[in-house]
Amino acid sequence: MSAFSEWYKDKVVLVTGGTSGIGRQMVIRLCQWGAEVIVCGRDASRLDSLKADLSSKGHKLAASFLLDLTDVQQLQSMIKDIKQSYELDVLINNAGSGHVGDFDKMTNESREYLEKLNMQVVTILISSFFDRFKEKEGRGILNVGSVASFFPTPGSALYCGTKHFILGLTDSLHLELAPDHVHVTGVYPGKTHSRFVERATGGAEGEWKKAMDAGVVAERALRSLSENKAREIPGINNKVIVFIAKLLPTRLLFKLMAKRNVQK
Ligand SMILES: NC(=O)c1ccc[n+]([C@@H]2O[C@H](COP(=O)([O-])OP(=O)(O)OC[C@H]3O[C@@H](n4cnc5c(N)ncnc54)[C@H](OP(=O)(O)O)[C@@H]3O)[C@@H](O)[C@H]2O)c1
């Protein structure tokens, strides 16, 4: 076990969307490092396969919840159950969804769904456990953004907007909660192997061609939270992209991004 993983030992951690992709890889590591992990997702078969995977390694989840996080009643009921039975130390807001397609072609339902899952659920969960995090040192919040948090993404405008929200919220909370010694970190992945693209494109695309391993992204994110780093951009290519986007004058950045519509 590496030194930073010690930070998670005996901590109670909630991972939203822990049944697949980046979240699943976080859950596997957290269990190995001795954390008590609570997972939520929607798909029962994926949760069963995660449990079987953990069990084959001699681990088990502290608790699991099958729910659609965008259903506020179900979300509030999960929060109540967790508060009754656990003293949460770490909240990982990982569950999120993408959308590839023009903004004006989105239905009201798909817009509301994306706004709720990628933003409202995050703020409801943070505010529900806010006071608890401030009670004692060594607690934390990890929010999952995207490299798209740092520049415009034509062809995926609302998703991009929700991830800009994650950047602003997380950076500000990092500073706001520093006097209370609460760790607050944002992780901003680029293309990562998971079911994300398949879902964002409604099945039109299966996988990114060149993408990072979800386990590597998960481990970098968890390490950065333990160190209370404000921003983790996993992978050298992603770091370079974000660095260039920050350096470029806005007019030049927009010219470049206009040619990079994610649908084309
Ligand atoms: N993969 C990438 O290239 C990439 C790049 C940048 C940022 N990200 C971000 O990384 C995060 C994790 O995504 P991923 O790539 O690991 O995708 P993924 O494989 O699709 O995993 C998403 C997870 O979130 C859960 N989830 C989704 N909608 C939910 C809902 N309404 N209620 C409850 N759980 C829900 C899923 O559970 P079920 O399967 O049970 O629905 C699943 O466990 C997201 O916030 C995403 O925006 C991903």
Image (cartoon, helix red, strand yellow):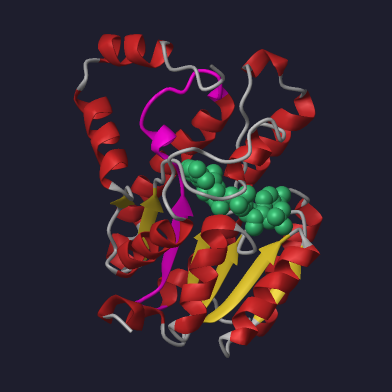
Q: Is residue 125 left or right of residue 215?
A: right
Query: How far from the left and from the top, in percent, is residue 203?
Result: 71, 35
Quick one: 124 or 232, which is closer to the camera? 232
Instruction: State which quadrant residue 253 falls in.
Output: top left
Quick one: 222 or 90, which is closer to the camera? 222
Q: Quadrant of the N terminus?
A: bottom left
Query: How far from the left and from the top, in percent, is residue 71?
Result: 78, 51
Magenta-span inclusion, residue 236: no
Residue at the farthest front position: 209
Instruction: State which quadrant residue 64 falls in.
Output: bottom right
Seen in the picture, residue 219 relative to 263 is either above or below; the reply is below
Give the residue displayed 54% in from the left and 71% down from the top. Answer: 27
Q: Is residue 214 left or right of residue 249?
A: right
Give the residue displayed 51% in from the left and 57% down from the top. Answer: 22
Question: Is any atom of residue 89 visible in this view?
Answer: no
Query: How far from the left and from the top, in percent, is residue 90?
Result: 48, 70
Quick one: 162 or 214, which is closer to the camera? 214
Magenta-span inclusion, residue 139: yes
- Tell me where the magenta segment starts and ends, as one range: 136-157
Q: Is residue 235 left or right of residue 26?
A: left
Instruction: State which quadrant residue 111 falls in.
Output: top right
Give the residue displayed 56% in from the left and 32% down from the top. Answer: 159
Query: How far from the left and from the top, in percent, is residue 135?
Result: 43, 76
Give the residue displayed 65% in from the left and 45% down from the top. Answer: 117
Q: Is residue 90 left or right of residue 54?
A: left
Question: Is any atom of residue 173 visible in this view?
Answer: yes
Quick one: 175 or 147, which is closer to the camera? 147
Seen in the picture, residue 246 relative to 248 is either above or below; the reply is below
